Amino acid sequence: MASLWLAVASPIDTFATFLLTVHMIQHLLLMLVAPPLILLASPEIPLLRGLPRWAVRNWLSPFLQWPAVRYLGRILTHPVFCWLTAAVALIGWHVPAAYELALHDPDWHNVEHITFFGTSLLFWWPVIQPWPSSAAWTRWSIPAYLAGGGMVSSALAAFLCFCDRPLYPSYAAAPRLFGWSVLEDQATAGAVMWTFGSFVLLGAAVVITVRLLDPSVTVRKPTARHPRWARPASRSPAPFDLLRVPVAGSLLRARHGRRSLQFVLLVLAGAVIADGFFGHRMASMNLAGVVPWTYGRALIVLALLVAGNLFCMACPFTLPRELGRRMGFATRRWPRVLRSKWLAVCLLVLFFWAYEAFDLWDNPQLTASILLAYFVTAFAVDTLFRDAAFCKYICPIGQFNFLGSLISPLEVRIRREQTCNTCATHDCIRGNQYHRGCELDLFLPRKVGNMDCTFCLDCVKACPHDNVGIVTLRLDRDLVRNPIRSALGRFSRRPDIAALALVLVSSGFVNAAAMVAPVTAWLDSLTSALSLASRAPVIGLYFVMGLVVAPMLLVSVATVGGRWLGCIQTPAMELGCRLSMALVPVGLAMWSAHLLFHLSTSWSTAVPVVQRAASDLRFTWLGTPQWITSSPLLSVDALLGLQILLLDAGMLLSLYVGWRIAGSYAGRTGDTLRLFTPWASVVTGMHAAGVWVLLQPMQMRGMIHG
Amino acid sequence: MRRPGVLLISFGLLPLVASADGLTVSVRQASGPFLVTVFTTPDPMRVGPVDVAVLVQDRKTGGVILDANVMFAARSLSGSGRHVLTLGTGYHAINKLLRSARLGIPDPGWWALDIRISRGESEAAVSTKIHVSPAKSRVSVVWPFLLIPPIAVALFVIHQMLWNSNRQSRFGQPQDARLVRHQAMTFKPGATSPGSHHRR
């Protein structure tokens, strides 16, 4: 791997455009050094062992056992095919027209390198015969095979050495380095190829011949048995547990670990509120305009994708809630009629509409007011009601995170079921004299997935058996299954959770679309056509249509259509509730693609904004803010590629989850397909809409290129 | 023995410490009391944002000068009369030895890039020509990524076919047929079965 890196990422690559000799060295590294060394390391074994066993068994194994793949593998690794492809690639790319194309176009240059590396891997395959390949020819034929390769390479090298004119015009035009003329450079390149190529190829032939002749050396024969180190482990490895990771685990389990995280965010929220009310009026120069909208949202979504519901773990609103709780008035339970997600659904819709209608991103004072109202509400609700009613039934950020964490890779879960079966105290939910139990009523042995889990780790601290960990969760598992979940029941009987999912999904697209030029122009023209003084009613209509009417219509049509096509008798409500959850991945992908754009384009805004806020408080030691544009975190093309990649991943996961859910209702593959087709169309349509939005010019919305 | 090792490590680390913000040397020229190296990116340059950076050195000592004022000006040579002017700063250059700026080049074609450097009484100017290619279509950037879903879906379809055929060959008959037989054997009037939501 080091030789590969040396070839393509070291200064050799830079010098290759000036000197043919250096370019030749680069190609020799790609053909004669890196491939044999990589094959000698038997890379397929660590690659296979590095994958989860279920992935190898369920996903890879059918492909590897497919007769067509095996047949193709036999052809690809046959010595004749390997030798010919390597020779054709070597000669073909040295034809002046092809070589010049590679020199002028970086993409073709990459293709050239990939071709050299790939065909050389094939060339060295019969020579090294990495496990588990078997020899197609006798071992005695390999020296001749190598000598044949050496002859091709030597012929080409001789042509380069003795040619009396420059073969590649680009080098004739390049600045001359080290005083070499073009012809000298060309002859040197040929000589390097001749000597080094012969040394490696003939050297390998000699080594193999000696080993064949030496009776004391046992020639490695292809074996049907796995080598000892390649055999599968007899036991599955223990799952990853974040709480057992040395530093992070200790920090999370520490008595004040979570509290210190909350305190940091509380101080930050205080600064945002203060700056919002008293700081600069320009949102892009104010903490209230930058911290929540540029950084906060993007980091929350990224945390959901790479770990879990980390924001709720460090939630700054917990501290005022705690204060309210300690006042001793919290004796009532949250009203039964409101014990669902419907209130949160309404609040989320209201928030998304307000964000657009009142330009929250551009109004620090309003942003600060909303934050303050959030603190006051959290305090008031938890002063009057027990059992974390604010988190479970009201907090829109929390609901967003709960839904998003359904595809997070980590969950709080019991480690050993047997320990819970013998536990009589159930401290994880009841609490004990030192620690309280789960306030969201999640009984750990029956808790499934991340819904309603704030990662508060109260259960971890309360469990006297040290039986709760933060362990890995398979991406699709939480959404596909429909077990009875502690404190939630089945998703199939929770239309409120399905509605929440639909709002999260549709808001990802509607919110991003509201920022692109064609949609804003359309909204403006609609405002003019209706002769309205303000855009607010049109925005309201847009959000009602986008967040309520369109999703309901799509889901109804998909449910009824799929049910009819697949001849399924399951109630439409149940089908709709289950399959709506399949849309969560594509919705979260759209959110992450959108917010990544803002994070990338304004990633360094915090520096001047913090400097400005500090200088307002007479703290000048942070320096003077410089309000100038800077490079984005990712180039425009790289960012767009990453955004589309996220959307692709979201769509594929949605399709897979939907297929599995549909399969649980339809007995036959054909019925599954018919039930799923309308939903697949919805997912594909969302993906197409997302790509269209990402390809449009997007407003910066009061943000600056920091 | 150590010297070659150190040289090898230095050679390997070279791209990390001499990245010059990932830019390409466009021109290196002595002008007035300064030695000026101009870097540009991307390569090839296209319509849109073009990063330009300059390293200003003392002509005699070679020492890097950090407090020089640098002004970048790009003017179209196609006769359109368009030009772009901006001030170079060290603020957003990753390599703090450079003065850099981002020029928004509006048209393709040849452009003259003029760099004016001043420091106290000393002044210098360096000029070079850059060729700007037409902007890449955004679709041309994303099409490889758009191919991923159909390929993944095709692989999934093949996987499911292989999975089902493996099951059939292992158990002798398709899964659905077994399910139907199981339902027929266990069906009792009035009782619900795992497949009762299915009409057939």
Image (spheres, rainbow, N blue to C red):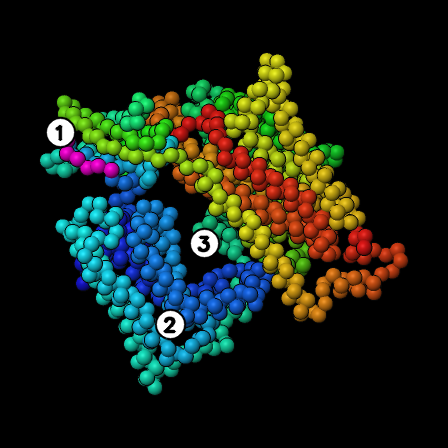
**Pointer 2 or 3: first along the chain:** 2
Secondary structure at numbered mark 3: helix
Q: Nearer the viewer, mark 2 or mark 1?
A: 2
Instruction: Name the residue rendered at 28%, 34% in the picture.
Output: B130
Q: CA distance from mark 2 to mark 1?
A: 62 Å
User: Which is more toward the observer, B106 or A695?
Assistant: B106
Secondary structure at numbered mark 1: loop
Q: Position of residue A546 (x, y in %)?
A: 63, 30
Q: Position of residue B128 (x, y in %)?
A: 23, 32
Residue under pointer 1:
B32
Q: Looking at the image, is A229 positioned above or below residue B16?
A: below
Residue under pointer 3:
A246
| Quarter of the rendering containing residue A22 | bottom left
Q: Position of residue B109 (x, y in %)?
A: 32, 32
Amino acid at dot 3: Pro
Residue under pointer 2:
A127
Region of the chain picked out in magenta, as a range = B26-31
User: Which is more toward the observer, A262 or B81?
Assistant: B81
Q: Classify 10 Å Cα crowding around label 2: few (below 14), some (14-19), many (20 and above).
A: many
